[in-house]
Amino acid sequence: MGKISVIAKGAKKNRSKYLPISINFCFGNFVFFKGKSMFSLNEGEIIDSFQEFLSDLDTLTYTSYLCELIDISMAEGESNRDLFKEFVSTFYLIKNKVGDMETLIRAFELKLLKYTGYDLNFDYCSKCKKRIKKASYISYRYYGGICDDCSKEGGVAVNPAVYSSLNYLNKLPIEKVYRVTLNNDIKDEVFQVLKGFIGQNYAKLPKSLDLLNIIKRSE
């Protein structure tokens, strides 16, 4: 059915049967019925509630960010099975503490761009189409790297190591991201590059990471 809005009447009441199946992050099988204007929840079965995310600020913030990415990138009623699979897989990888969470989030952002029609090209110059192994400039206008021979416009200069990291993460299955180790400088620059693409292509920028970034800067 894709992304849909659902009403769970009385879910906030302590004894409501809907309370445990309507909490944040809950993954399950649900039965809805269509009302005049939107769907209403009838019943549900929890597969995984992911409530352990609530006990750690970093985990809570990053998983809230993932949910926000889904929300801003998809229209009501839009279905995207590939993206849903990557989304759930990322939740389980975070739950099981597989690899570096920040690197995993960057990999998911790349999958999000890909499966919503904004796949990035790192193997060929996005202007002249010449094959390239590395580059020091990424174009937001042309969705990929720009070779040394082409004019640079509508993008950002990057460290070649950042370019290589993006290229590798873009091709890597999400469940294998744990193999990747990036230093903090590269992670920060990768984040800024992808933030630019997200801000350009979706209705708005997610706000979930703002609080975490403020806290980390104050430490």
Image (cartoon, rainbow, N blue to C red):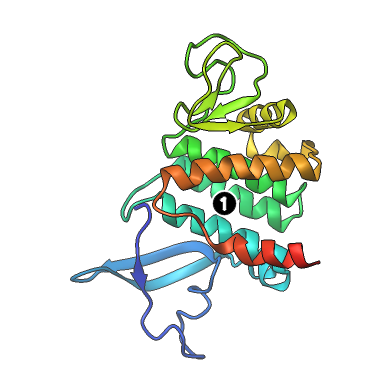
Pick out the residue farthest to the left. Answer: 36
Q: Name which residue type carries label 1.
A: Val
Residue at 21 percent of width and 69 percent of height: 37
Q: Is residue 60 left or right of residue 19?
A: right
Q: Give the percent coordinates (x, y) of residue 27.
A: 53, 62
Residue 156 location, x and y as percent? 58, 33
Q: Nearer the viewer, residue 137 or 121?
A: 137
How many tags in the picture? 1
Residue 157 image point, x, y percent: 63, 30
> At x 78% / y 36%, what residue is drawn?
179
Question: What percent of the width, then of the height, locates residue 200?
Answer: 44, 43
> In the displayed structure, does residue 42 sit left or right of residue 167?
left
Residue at disc 1, secondary structure: helix
* Name of the residue lying farthest toward the bottom: 14
Residue 33: which quarter of the image? Answer: bottom left
- The residue indicated by pointer 1 is 88
Residue at figure coordinates x 68%, y 41% from the top left:
189
Viewer-closest of 125 and 21: 125
